[in-house]
Every structure is written in C-alpha cells, then in structure tokens.
Image (tube, helix red, strand yellow):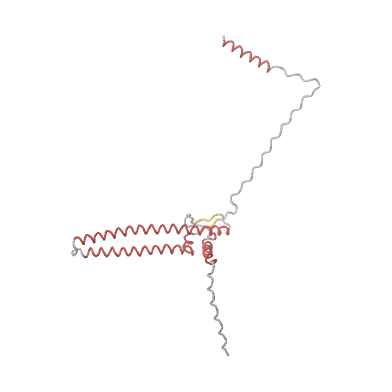
Amino acid sequence: MRVLVAALAVSMLLAASETHAQAPAPARPAGQQPAPPRPLAPAPAAAPAPPPVPFQIGLKYAYIRIDRIAAESSEGKALNERVKALNDQKVRELNDKNKALQSAQQKLESGGNVLNDTARAQLQAEVERLQRDIQRFTEDAQQDLQALQQQLQEEFTRKLNPVLDRVAREKQVHMVFNATESGLVWADPTMDLTSDVIKALDTAAAAPAATAKPTAPAPAAPAPAAPAPAAK
C-alpha cells in the first residue's frame, strides 16, 4: 500500500511538471514590439605571447691551464719549493735509516761464525727493529707530504680565485674552463687566459711587498760641538 501511494505521488509530480512545462507563455500586449536580441559581448583579446628570450647572445668563453699557472707563477713556484724542501728532508732522513739498516745487516752476515748466540740474536732484533722503523717512517712521510700538498693547494686556490675573477671580468667572458681537468681537446688559442692570469697573480703577490712601510732610518748622530776659542 505504501509503495502504491509513493508511486501515485511520483506520477502526480511528473504530471504537474509536464503541465507546467506546457503552459503557454504570457501574451504580449498589442502594439508592443519584441525586444531586440542582446548583442553578444566580444571575447577578450588574448594577450600576445612574449617573444622568446635568446640564450646568452654573444656568449664568450675562455680557458686556463692550472698546471702552467702552478709551475710558472711566483706563488706556484714558492709553494712547490715548500713541498720540495719537505720531500728532500724526508729523503735524507730515510737514507740515514737505510744506511743504519745496511750496516746492521752486514755485521750480521759477516759475523755469523764469530758472534755467539746472544750477540747474533741481539743483532737480528736490531735489524728487524730498523726495518719496522723504516716502514713506519715511509708511511708517515707520505702522509706528511700529502697533507702539505693539500694545505698548499687550498692556499693557492684562495689566492688564485679572486685574480681569476678579476681577469675574467676584464676580458668580459661568461665562462672559464680548466683545460687541465675539463677534458677540453681543442679551443681557440686566443681564448687562453693562462698568461694573463699568471701575470695578474704575480702582480698581486708583489703588491703587499711594494706597499710595506719602509723601515725608518736611524737618527743621525749629533754634530760635535765646536771647540772653544783659545784664550789670548
């Protein structure tokens, strides 16, 4: 029964909607002209697309050879001398230790039939101690040299970067490549800034020495007093 009532209610709603949809439009008074159709509003004009921006018109590049700068500049030569001095010192010390080892080994070989067991054992222990000492010294010397090279490389880079920046701006280039490590196989030789950077780096290194205050000259000794006139 409830389903039937619901179905009747739905059919009545549908009938009412159809009746409303078919109702005639209200009559227009006599003599009244129909309203003209409203013109459609024009669509807003699309903004013109901005022109594409060209990528770096007049792009200029340059390159440098770090190995030449390190070998030929005064800063690079000074740093290389510091590495060479430490290396030479370690080589001299290592040679002294090798001489001591060779001497102990010769004593052990030549006195094999003369030395007693105790002396031979002591000499053998001395040879082994010298061998261990040489091995440790060699490892420590390599680490010391690597640490110094790393320190000097960072120091060299700190001095090179501002000079390289200044030279690149003066030449109005956008990029500078390191030809030593970039894999560059060919480039226009006129874009090589290595000589310019070496010259600028040497000038920057010489500037502090030139601007140093000169030492004040020692005060002049007072002139000796004039002798008193002789009494008449």
Q: Position of residue 201 (x, y in %)?
A: 52, 62
| Residue 217 in the figure: left or right of residue 125 | right
Q: Nearer the viewer, residue 221 or 83?
A: 221
- At x 44%, y 58%, the residue is 151
Q: Nearer the viewer, residue 230 or 125?
A: 230
Q: Quadrant of the N terminus?
A: top right
Q: Nearer the viewer, residue 226 or 217?
A: 226
Q: Position of residue 142 (x, y in %)?
A: 37, 58
Residue at the extreme front:
232
Q: Splitting the image into 4 quarters, where does residue 10 fall?
A: top right
Q: Splitting the image into 4 quarters, where does residue 174 fall?
A: bottom right
Q: Position of residue 139 (x, y in %)?
A: 35, 57
| Residue 121 in the figure: left or right of residue 153 | left
| Residue 160 in the figure: left or right of residue 32 | left
- At x 28%, y 59%, the residue is 129
Q: Position of residue 121 (x, y in %)?
A: 22, 59
Residue at the extreme bottom:
232
Residue at the extreme right:
31
How many marks the image carries: the answer is 0
- At x 20%, y 60%, the residue is 118
Q: Quadrant of the C terminus?
A: bottom right
